[in-house]
Image: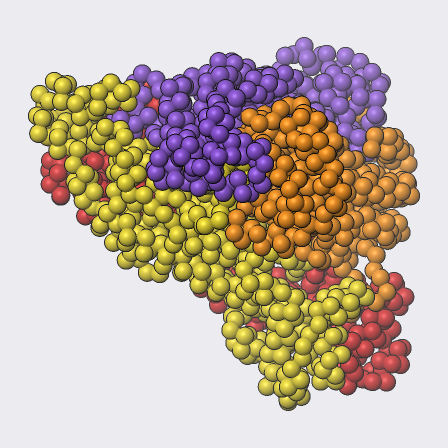
Chain colours: A purple, B orange, C red, D yellow
Amino acid sequence: MIPRYTPADFAQLWSAERRLSTWLEVELAACEAMELAGIVPQGTAASIRDKKLVLDANRVDEIEQTTRHDVIAFLTHVEELAGPPARWLHRGMTSSDVLDTAFAMQLRDATDLLDARLRGLIFALRKRVEEHRRTVMIGRSHGIHAEPITFGLALAGHYSELVRGVARLAAARSEISVGTISGAVGTMAHLAPEIEAHALSKLGLRAEPVPTQVVPRDRHAAYFSALAVIATAIERLATNVRHWQRTEVLEAEEPFTAGQKGSSAMPHKRNPILSENLCGLARMVRAYAGASLENVALWHERDISHSSAERMLAPDATTTLGFMLERCRRLVEGLVVYPENMRGNLEKTGGLWASEAVLLALVHSGMARQEAYVFVQRNAMKAWRHEGDFLSNLLSDTDVVSRVGEQKVREAFSLEHALHNVDALIDRALALEV
Amino acid sequence: MIPRYTPADFAQLWSAERRLSTWLEVELAACEAMELAGIVPQGTAASIRDKKLVLDANRVDEIEQTTRHDVIAFLTHVEELAGPPARWLHRGMTSSDVLDTAFAMQLRDATDLLDARLRGLIFALRKRVEEHRRTVMIGRSHGIHAEPITFGLALAGHYSELVRGVARLAAARSEISVGTISGAVGTMAHLAPEIEAHALSKLGLRAEPVPTQVVPRDRHAAYFSALAVIATAIERLATNVRHWQRTEVLEAEEPFTAGQKGSSAMPHKRNPILSENLCGLARMVRAYAGASLENVALWHERDISHSSAERMLAPDATTTLGFMLERCRRLVEGLVVYPENMRGNLEKTGGLWASEAVLLALVHSGMARQEAYVFVQRNAMKAWRHEGDFLSNLLSDTDVVSRVGEQKVREAFSLEHALHNVDALIDRALALEV
Amino acid sequence: MIPRYTPADFAQLWSAERRLSTWLEVELAACEAMELAGIVPQGTAASIRDKKLVLDANRVDEIEQTTRHDVIAFLTHVEELAGPPARWLHRGMTSSDVLDTAFAMQLRDATDLLDARLRGLIFALRKRVEEHRRTVMIGRSHGIHAEPITFGLALAGHYSELVRGVARLAAARSEISVGTISGAVGTMAHLAPEIEAHALSKLGLRAEPVPTQVVPRDRHAAYFSALAVIATAIERLATNVRHWQRTEVLEAEEPFTAGQKGSSAMPHKRNPILSENLCGLARMVRAYAGASLENVALWHERDISHSSAERMLAPDATTTLGFMLERCRRLVEGLVVYPENMRGNLEKTGGLWASEAVLLALVHSGMARQEAYVFVQRNAMKAWRHEGDFLSNLLSDTDVVSRVGEQKVREAFSLEHALHNVDALIDRALALEV
Amino acid sequence: MIPRYTPADFAQLWSAERRLSTWLEVELAACEAMELAGIVPQGTAASIRDKKLVLDANRVDEIEQTTRHDVIAFLTHVEELAGPPARWLHRGMTSSDVLDTAFAMQLRDATDLLDARLRGLIFALRKRVEEHRRTVMIGRSHGIHAEPITFGLALAGHYSELVRGVARLAAARSEISVGTISGAVGTMAHLAPEIEAHALSKLGLRAEPVPTQVVPRDRHAAYFSALAVIATAIERLATNVRHWQRTEVLEAEEPFTAGQKGSSAMPHKRNPILSENLCGLARMVRAYAGASLENVALWHERDISHSSAERMLAPDATTTLGFMLERCRRLVEGLVVYPENMRGNLEKTGGLWASEAVLLALVHSGMARQEAYVFVQRNAMKAWRHEGDFLSNLLSDTDVVSRVGEQKVREAFSLEHALHNVDALIDRALALEV
């Protein structure tokens, strides 16, 4: 979480104050559940709530210097502010009940922030898909011209991938929307399933079946892995923007604002810096997922080795992804598209993209596929070496013309035919449930 | 896939022969769909099927020396064996249609092998949970005695985690059960959605909405990440076995077979080598997930950089996890449990595990929590330093006894009370849908 | 860099102010070199230096809102403060000259902070090695008692590993102590090797031979990988502290300060939380190394995808390791050692640790090794099952006694013999050059 | 190690036979050292050597089914073949002495195979650097045209990086050229430093100062990290080949052999598949480095969790890198370069690459840098939008011409000036010590 890449809502979500107030929320929900269960005096939680405590993170830090234990420092501070009723808080509970349950709430809220941004990006992308449904461009495999597509179709591939991200995010949210109020080593020795059920339902969480004190970290590993997959989807889109913007290609370009400067040395530069930035950030989110996988194999009922890593990676991973989604949406919205350059590039190879259609025509005429391949390839390779354009080469190759006739050769170069299923494919993407 | 860690069914699944026969299956399914669509002569696929081709992986390799293209080499070999009808194969398709669709089938089948093994492990674990439902042991946080649990409860935590693995595996299976028959850059220029639908349904796969020639690799990244989470769950269990078997703890032990030797130097050794082996293998499965995340951001409509990585990691990740699941099942089944040692360890601290119950009794008597904490801690720390046992210390601490009475102090040391919710917790685990 | 884990000197090193002042240092060094070369008016740098500029990071941020370029914003701000002479700054240079050269300086300075801390840790460890040179404990392989060692020897292993860290850190420092003053795409079109040489020598850096505008990121990948290896060395030591402190083992314990509380629920707890914390942080440093490896393969002469990742990982990796080294030193210094518990544990197995010596005695008597193994193992396994202690078992096994005699059997149990080379081994460690 | 990517010498190096023969070599070297020390009868090793044993890996596997211990199985097999003298082997040693020392020898030999290949690649690259020292091309930052370079200079950047790889490989080789003959928990209870020194010197290894039974795994983590950095250097070169070969760029192309087919669907295709393959493999080598870092923190004096991971990753990482280096060398040697396309691309932007030179001319005329920037940028952006070429725009911009005159503007477009330091930079690279 460096300021440069931290949206305000994530800054708030992961602030010390929000952490402490979420802890208090957990304590009070548990307290109310215990009141119902008759093991804490009625009205305890309400009396503390009424005080509208403003917890002071610095004071908690100060107390922690002595206790070396953050939750005890927090409870001590609450006692300072709320007086005697506070002694009923945390009854039969252990720190993990507070920490892990509150962590679940923060991660869940972070996920909601992510979900809204992801949907925003998807919505922006959908508009561009529709807009460029029929904007013809050359499709490329291996960076080499292949056959025609439309720009809308290229974007629809990214669209589908991001839509899968919504489902992954929902699954991830469900994975971690789990708390526990089960006390030391998770046995509920001084608690009860009903207390936990009541408290967690108030907090909007499910109960971890067998907490062993903590919410097990496989959930978090799955969560952060899902984030990494989504960050990587953005990386793929950003990588393609970088390709489209290359000087020789220039089929699309990042928005370049008035006053913007591309280079301190070279005033002519317009660089895809947003996309490059996104690629770099994706590496970070992936790295955090890796660390989260190492957090799972805690010793016995729990150790606390996950905690230091999570203090860093949980805010970092969610915030970075949040920033990425937002930046990516703006990138998609502002992307300047050059259909004429797309067309220009498509035409650069003198119709080489039609080689498959010619091949199929030859096969239909009765040739073996691999033999036909040789005929087509020799004409294509000549065109590649700038010895005539592909169509002319074919038309003067008697092996080819004698088999399929000039008409069939010419038909192979029909863009309309090449793209006749594109609408159906785009519709498949847009029909996906978001 | 080293022989040492490769179960026979995985060896078969990832063999060159299986790869080629799966490719042929895809080609024939597509061919039949094209026959229905009227663009390939009726009966083509059937006539090839009738030949019951036995594809020769070495011959394909030989042809590939010239073509430098594996699918073309395969098709050439099929033409060699099947003659003229083979020229209709692959019509309008591109290599990725074959490779990615076949890869999906192999991954799906691998997942089924994993699922069966995972269920076998879960079943084995379930029996041990039931068996040790009431086998009392000390719960440990940070490796330090905390409060009592039962061994069944400890296992139930692992059980729940592995059950989550079943759902993750199912989701992962669904992620990659997707093929494509869409031709170059995925536009179906010479194909049709109906052809793809027909072929894939025959193969038991769904269609990738916007393939851009390949099945996008975010699916595979999600898949291998799921495998990593499951491998890590095994690592957590194996780590705990290693802890239980430590000489000073010796609460459970790996099976040690007749004739087995623990050390070349020290004939007295019995080491948890299966568990250590599993921990090491989990690192590999995690590593493969990391590489799969780097495979996603392909250039434009596709590049083939994922292929070399997948040739290694797909067999390695699935096979290694398959081996792990099997080995872990045998480990669980054969685990030798020492309830008497568990009891002995529990009793080692002179009842320190009851400190929370004493604390709560003091709070109930009206003390502030943090003040009560100090009273209990001072008696506990004396016991820790071997100055008296904890119960005696408390009973001779007038600050304590004057507030709650001797009876309440004694009651805090009730194992029955400490464990009264354990059955409910175990039942929560066993009630999970597998 | 979260405040919790950020030592003050690292906070200062990675502050926005330090970043800007280092940039200015680079610009001025380059300016002076250009003055010497006669392409910038004499005295330009001096006149700017004389102004003792205080750069305002907020103002730079503000300007960057328009320019979208950080170095241009910085230069604009310098012009605001320093007036006309500032236009000579950055002549013929590009942003990377400033950014990468300054980054090298910051990384180099961070390395010096790390080096001092690493040496502090090594020094602390050396004292404990000496102190416990002859403190006998049982050596453990696989967590199982093996043969005797001394605690000093165990620590000496960690000592050696950390000493290797010093050399790795030095190599890493050298890797990144490299800058460039070479202008756009690194061709020095408006500069000269002499200018670069002069400027960099003033800054204490070497020149990148072929910069292609940036300092290539393989250097940084090697650097952060070295940090990861050092962090992992700390993880190994911390892992062992956690093992030593386990309740059943309790051979050493983290310092527990007055007022410290181990658990919010259980007043009796003393947990190895420093060590667990270190283990978690090691995972992060490893993760950063992974991301840095993905930063290497920039496109053509450079892209800027590494930058966003480095803005996060460079401060995070160095600071986290700095914090770890410091915390680990305090842990080592304060570690409470229980030699009597070590002795108690050693004696727990009734001398099983002598099994190898008995085996060797049998081999010397003329038996085949594997046959002798069986004799020893059967007596050991009985002891393992608490059927007699090992020595008694051996003495009543006529197969054994008839071959080597009672005297030889008894001699095998000599601790003195078992440890007679320990001093030499420790001396090998302490003789390593730090 | 899949056959497709396994050079023959690596297959041999990592074969079961080589493993066993290396073990025997270690045992015999240790035996000879013990003979000298007088604790094993003179001539034992020689008498075994004379038998020229051919170890049978299958037989060892068979025995291991019972012993569950690979080194004991090996020793048993040696006894079968060599008879009574074999009982003196392994005296006072433990498996790790054999395994880790032999592993060091295999890794060292693997490193030598890598080193030769790396030098081969460097040598090939050096020739291409010289060949294209003056082949002008546009330099690109962010994928966008920047200023001119030469192709030789671009290659010289890769050259320098690979030369750094030689030093890294040498350091890595030194890290792991370390063995141990120290017995259980590394105390040499039945051995002596002199025995170890003698045996290891015979094997060409140094002694681990404090082995704690195993050679500590930080060495291997450093080793595999170095391999990952080298693999990543290849990835960077391969990435650039992919860029150069893009249809719109086509400045260089992978060799395309007679009979090669680029696509099963599109006969016109020539794809950079070698380079893509190398990029994918680099991901694997990186992944292995990650796993090796997790192998370091073994428990106490050692556990064996590293072993299963190393059985997979050590052969895989070294072999994959070996394959990569070889393939990359062939790629470099066969790379088809198109200087005319480079020139064509350079000229595409109408001289925009000269923008910095114009900027500097304006600054020299007395303007403030940021003001001059605006003048140049407005003419550049017009050219970018195809409104006139850059030079004409400048010449008709009176703000510019009035300040510097037409002559200075024209001089800014001198290629000769732009490249006047390129030779010096290339010479810096070629002067590096390999």
Residue B393, relative to residue D8: is it above or below?
A: above
Residue C330 percent location from the top left of the image:
54, 48
Residue A431 percent location from the top left of the image:
63, 16
The quadrant in which the C terminus of chain A is found is: top right
- Number of numbered callouts drawn: 0
Indicate left or right for A414 with C78 as reference.
right
Residue B365 percent location from the top left of the image:
81, 25
Residue B325 percent location from the top left of the image:
76, 46
Q: Residue at (79%, 23%) from the top-left corner?
A: A196
Residue A320, relative to residue D47: is it above or below?
A: above
Residue D132, relative to residue D145: is it above or below?
A: below
Q: Residue at (66%, 37%) from the top-left corner?
A: B27
Tell me where residue C62 sits by quadrant: top left
Which one is nearer the viewer's eye here, C220 or B222? B222
Indicate left or right for A241 with A372 as reference.
left
Answer yes or no: is residue B56 visible.
yes
Residue B8, relative to residue D173: is it above or below?
A: above
Q: Residue at (15%, 32%) from the top-left corner?
A: D412
